Amino acid sequence: MAAALDLVQDEDGRDAVWRRRADRSRFGGRWVRCVQSLSSCSAAAIAVTAAAAITSRRASVGRPVRTASACASGRLCVGNVLPACPSAHVGSRCLLVLANWTAWWKLLQGQRHAIGSADGMRVGYVDDGLERRVPSRAQVYKASSVQSRLIMMRYAPGGVAAQVVGVHLLLRGPLDVERLRRGLIELTRRHDILRTNYALSESGEVLAIVHENEGPDVLDVARPTGLVDEREIRDHGNTLMRGVVGKFTSPDRHSILQAVLTHHAADVHSLVLAIDHVAVDERSKALLQRELAALYAGRVDDLGEPHPYDAAAVRNVFPAIDETPDLRELLTPLPPRILASPDPQRDPDAFRPVVASRTLGTAVWDRVGEASRRLRCTRFVVHVAAVMWALKQFSDSDDISFVTAMDTRLRPQDFDTVGFFQNLVLLRSRSPRSAGIAATLEECRTIVRDAFRRRDYPIASLVAEARAERGEAGCRNPLYQIALAYAVEDVDLGWRLDGVDVEPVELDFPEAAIELFVYLSESPSDTKALLLGAAGALGSAELDRLLTLWREAVGALTGDDPATRDNDGQRLGSSVR
């Protein structure tokens, strides 16, 4: 529902009365009879709350942040991109109720502009009987299915506190702080998704609120530290990131991009960047990297007009699972839980992170490329098969499943649009171990192709189906325990600032998002696997054993040992025509 509002002021400009123009009908389910002495600037600020309250009593303004963890499509995800991250409510009543003054007054700080919705909300001032309308300062639209999934997962029981893709950049060289500030502000001006926050309607629909202005709090400059030791600088970056995350649950923010700059020593700075995951995926991050580099260098003419995120262009209507035979088959029976499944609410310490990693060296890149050509599949299929086979051997189970992120962009302009276009897809292998790794590889070729075909089908629908069948037993996610994040090159290596050496610094993982995250990155210089496990599900020795099995699987698929031969003694794929 949307409506036109008037703000009537008396002669001294202090007393303000909100009312519905032309009648006294209900406002958010309640009569508007609020009269309060306010300053004129505060009255304009109330307009922000009024417009949001008409469409939603409960604003998603977040709750105190608890943890941070890794994300399937980013280096750091504060919270959990997969099963959950949270929100909170500024009361259950209309935000104009003055009993909630303290709570919603904080919401107004920094947003003292009139707000309008896409379907006609506006704020007017009465002057000698003539109405002067203030230009609309925000638009409200129904969020896309992808946006809704990420927001609604923040309400899942046992979820973590926020979804933030973050990076700590160590800057060496003469840095122009004002040029950096202007560049970050221009980024948020160019891309409306970086000025969007979200609210829930009374029907449970997720609404996106796009602010016209970029917000006053994009870049903070912290006090100098005097640090020179890189380990201390790394620890300081982790502390800064935890502080930045707090802004993503603060009710007065409306910029989705936050940055903190710290001066350590002569020409040495830390830049901590955090972006709400609902606004960015890996391709989007690469676009922002290129734009920030151009803006900092003053090459504004190199940038074309940005393509705004269009929620209406995203597919939002899908058939039921029972009307989709391959999905019904995928979920019948539900995938087994091959790892211990701790309850995050009863035992939060069970998701304390346990980390292990291994690199395979430079030769693997060429070997995987040669294997993919011989086997006539993509590099991704080779790696999926290696992970599947390692998990089968590790768990002594033939039925293995995990989720991975796939890009859902369809239109040409979407590939130049900043936004979140990824969806999680469920990959499930049921080929018996007795058939060997060749059968697993052949099956993975099929399941990856099928998953790509339905890559935009909402993972939330599959999760809901699993929850309905398994009941409310405490677990982080009722459908999956394992996620695979795959990347060619590390996107965080793409940050550039003219005349400054930029080096990404590893951030800690304060919490495991689910029972097991598998991060796999490859480049001509190295192939690396990083496992992030939950302490209640996996120990260090178990992660080391799983890494060993993964290395052996990669060798079996790409090398020339007996495991790469079929029953006739030929190399895998050598007889394929």
Image (cartoon, grey):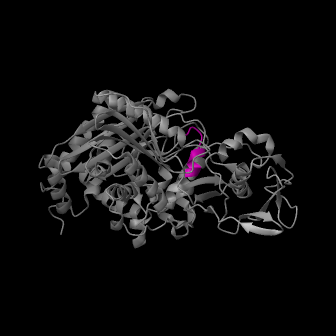
309 versus 503 height, above or below: below
Q: Position of residue 554 (x, y in %)?
A: 21, 47
Q: Residue furthest bottom?
A: 412
Left or right position of 362 against 399: left
Residue 143 picture quarter: bottom right
Q: Position of residue 397 (x, y in %)?
A: 37, 42
Asked if residue 534 shows in the view, the reply is no
- Name the residue nearer the viewer: 437 or 462: 462
Q: Is residue 113 visible?
A: yes
Q: Nearer the viewer, residue 146 or 209?
A: 209
157 is within the stretch colored magenta: yes
Residue 29 quadrant: bottom right
Query: Does residue 160 lie above or below 495 as drawn?
Result: above
Nearer the observer, 482 or 505: 505
The quadrant of the image that shows the N terminus is: bottom right
Picture coordinates of residue 507, whole percent (x, y): 36, 36
- The quarter of the rendered structure image containing the C terminus is bottom left
Magenta span contains residue 370: no
Q: What residue is drawn where x is 18% and y is 65%?
A: 576
The extreme front residue here reads 12
Magenta range: 151-161
Residue located at (28% from left, 58% from top): 442
Q: Residue at x 75, y 47 (%)?
A: 39
Q: Which residue sits at x=19%, y=42%? A: 360
